[in-house]
Image (spheres, grey):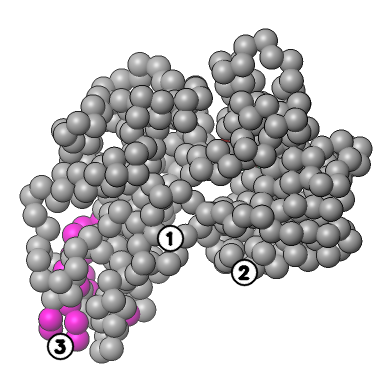
Amino acid sequence: MKQIILKPGKEESILRHHPWVFSGAISSLPEDLQEGEMVEVISSRRKKLATGHYQIGSIAVRILEFGETSIPENFYSERLFSAYQLRKTLNLIRKDNNCYRLIHGEGDFLPGLVVDIYGDTAVLQAHSPGMHFDRFKIADALVNLPQAHIRNVYYKSDTTLPFKANLGAINDYIIGKYDGCLAIENGLSFNIDWLKGQKTGFFIDQRENRMLLEKFSYGRNVLNMFCYTGGFSVYAMRGGAAKVISVDSSSKAIELTEANVNLNFPSDNRHTAVAEDAFKFLDGIKKDEYDLIILDPPAFAKHRSALKNGLIGYRKLNLKAFEKIRKGGVIFTFSCSQVVTKEMFRLAVFTAASQSGRKVRILHQLTQPADHPVDISHPEGEYLKGLVLYVE
Ligand code: SAH
């Protein structure tokens, strides 16, 4: 196997099992090394430290195996099996819950790979060329995963692979075909459209937070901003909300939300969905109309360069909610931007609270659920941050 040699002293983070090798740490690499190829990572003292996928860019190697061990033939089967066992331990695979994240990249020791399960379909996303080239092996391991009953594997990586790698990835079934999908989450049903939808079709990462919201919903007037598939709305309805308004700028999202609400609560007139820009909508509502508001926007800062504007965005959005919410109201506010830390997000929300003049207390501090685990050596894996706030 080809080898990458590190500069002196650059082995430290690998010895601590951080799964990335940055290009700046590399002293030499073979001229004919191809993007996506498996490589050995060697210290300046010529000791083998790890094996991983090579990629052009600032993260040059994503490590799959640490130490001298080479990658075994059944590598993917083993990692998938161990990830599956964890989801079973978490009691996520039940009659009333058939969707969960099976592989969360580094958090499941498979950097560059995401796999979400919806019933008997796995939606596979490669974030690295190495995982793209291994997609058939992975798909094979998925359908052969004992007890998991996976029959279809849909590959969806056209937007997640590095654009410059020019891999010509096409979204398509690697194994099986579309046979309709009704995902069941905590007993609620959702139509999942992984062909056209965002990410793998559903935001599985809000599952636990939606459950918490349900408990706050009884008798409340709920405003679900950035509703996408209407996840929070459906839980609020089950929780006994007096009325639920779902808002998203995309009319496709509004259609999805209406379909999902109808699926669970046919001809229930408590729900209304509105296709409008969130900021405009919040400007247009009366003060005190709502006493439970969800703010779950898309990542306002996708890259470090967008951080400053992203934080301004979070502050402005939260300020609008603080200004409008009824006394005794509750806000569920989130950020899924990886580059925005917990502290930064909190500061943006605190600033908004103080600008609004409202008295605000934190009731809960939220994050991503256990099927999106964070490898302790890779704190970058923590991305979802949320606060539940009581506003007086
Ligand atoms: N809360 C959702 C996930 C939100 S994803 C869930 O639990 O599944 C973010 C959503 O914000 C997308 O559906 C996108 O269409 C919508 N969006 C993006 N910009 C927006 C804007 N300015 N106003 C309203 N919605 C917006």
Front: mark 3 or 1: 1
Q: Looking at the image, which residue is at 87% across and 50% down?
A: 323
Q: Position of residue 214 (x, y in %)?
A: 61, 35
Q: Position of residue 356 (x, y in %)?
A: 87, 59
| Quadrant of residue 235 within the rendered picture | top right
Q: Position of residue 52 (x, y in %)?
A: 22, 62
Reply above or below: 79 against 255. below
Q: Position of residue 270 (x, y in %)?
A: 74, 20
Asked if residue 161 lies left or right of residue 365, the reply is left
Residue type at tag 1: Gly
Q: Earlier in the sequence, mark 3 or mark 1?
A: 3
Q: Earlier in the sequence, mark 1 or mark 2?
A: 2
The residue carrying mark 2 is: 343
Q: Secondary structure at mark 1?
A: helix
Q: Looking at the image, which residue is at 72% across and 47% down?
A: 331
Task: Residue 155: say if magenta.
Answer: no
Q: Secondary structure at mark 2?
A: helix
The residue carrying mark 1 is: 381
Identify the magenta region.
25-47
Front: mark 1 or 2: 2
Q: Residues within 10 Å of mark 2 (few under 14, many from 20)?
A: few
